[in-house]
Image (cartoon, rainbow, N blue to C red):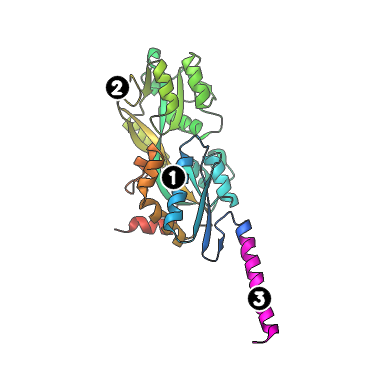
Amino acid sequence: MNISTVKKILAAGAVLVFSAALLTGCGGNSASSGDKKFLNIGTGGTAGTYYPIGGAIAEVLNKDIPGMNASAQSTGASVANINMLRDGAVDLATVQNDITYYAVNGTEMFKDKKVDGLQGIASLYPETCQFVTLQSSGIKSLSELKGKRVAVGAAGSGVEANVRQILAAYGVSYDDIDAKFLSFAEGASALKDGNVDVAVLTAGYPTASVQDIAAQNPVRLLPVEDKIADDLIAKYPFYTKTVIPAGTYAGFDEAIPSVSVMAMLVAGPSVNADLGYSITKAIFSNLDRLQAAHAVGKQITKDTAKAGMSLPMNAGAEKYFNEK
């Protein structure tokens, strides 16, 4: 081999190395350099549930999938995550299944802004609609809310959409109540101060903010009865039935039926069927790691992985769940 040929080979090698470096430097999305796969996972705030669960998912993907370089990042949660999936800023994200439904159908906060290319990986755990009042209010049913002051969630939020849909099933509209567009933190304070009669949140139970209220004032959760839940699910397939166990909150010893939306793992168009299968298998082969990351991890099971699935599934995820 003459010197000229050697120089050409070395030059070609340098170009390949430089190209690989460029790919590595630019590739936050599922860019792969050789056998290296880069995967960004959108979660939520660092104090919430999505962030530790997302971090645990990144860990198991890195452990079980050869060449994987997955990382979880803190985000503004469900709506922000849908927008990041659409823009290719993340490849996977934890999102409420109702928000996903709105995105793929172009309704609610995604009205006229339908998002294409989203794929379901799995439903993870329920986030329960909790209507909280003080026992001193005497309110025992959602049908009694006409004329009451209700903290319905921040304007345009997923919680606010849940409240509107559930109350409508009881024949109650915002025209019938004094709706206060407050986040649950604001609503909880207003409830304790006597400025609202009911505050609503959608979250996994027990929820710290409700525990805080219950520690100071006896609380009551208002039920969503089975018949109403059936009507809701027929109209909005993302809801699932839930029973909040007696004693979940101090001083309230009744089991309360309600409905939940599901926290789910959603993929963007960058996740193909092969990668979707590998991701799903890795997660459901390492549920102990998710259980160690947060208490809600105990509710993540293969049996409930399709509960409330509100969009078409990734073909690889579907294949994994169909295996015996």
Mark closer to the chain start, 1 or 3: 3
| Residue in view at x 40 percent, y 18 percent | 215
- Against 23, residue 198 (above or below) is above
Residue found farthest to the bottom:
1
Q: x%, y% of residue 149?
A: 49, 18
In magenta segment, residue 22? yes
Q: What residue type is labelled 2?
A: Asp
Q: Give the range drawn in magenta.
A: 1-23
Residue 57 visible in the picture = yes
Of the numbered discs 3 and 2, the one sitting upstream in the chain is 3
Name the dominant secondary structure of the magenta segment.
helix
The label nearer to you, 3 versus 2, is 3
Mark closer to the observer (1, 3): 3
Q: Which is nearer the eye, 228 or 100?
A: 100
Q: Residue at x 46, y 41 (%)?
A: 52
- Which image quarter holds the N terminus? bottom right
Secondary element under disc 2, as helix, strand or loop, is loop
Which residue is located at x 54 percent, y 52 percent? 116
Asked which secondary structure carries label 1, the reply is: strand
Q: Mark 1 points at which residue?
A: 264
Label 2, on which residue? 253
Q: From the viewer's perspective, is residue 138 above or below residue 317?
A: above
- Across and down, in percent, residue 172 comes to 44, 25
Secondary structure of the residue carrying numbered label 3: helix
Instruction: For residue 230, say whether it is visible.
Output: no
Q: Is residue 305 found left or right of 108 in the rendered image?
A: left
Q: Mark 3 points at which residue?
A: 10
x, y percentage for residue 147? 47, 16
The answer to whether the residue labelled 3 contacts the one labelled 2, judged by CB atoms less than 8 Å apart, is no
Q: Distance between the residues labelled 1 and 2?
A: 30 Å
Q: Which amino acid does label 3 sit on?
A: Leu
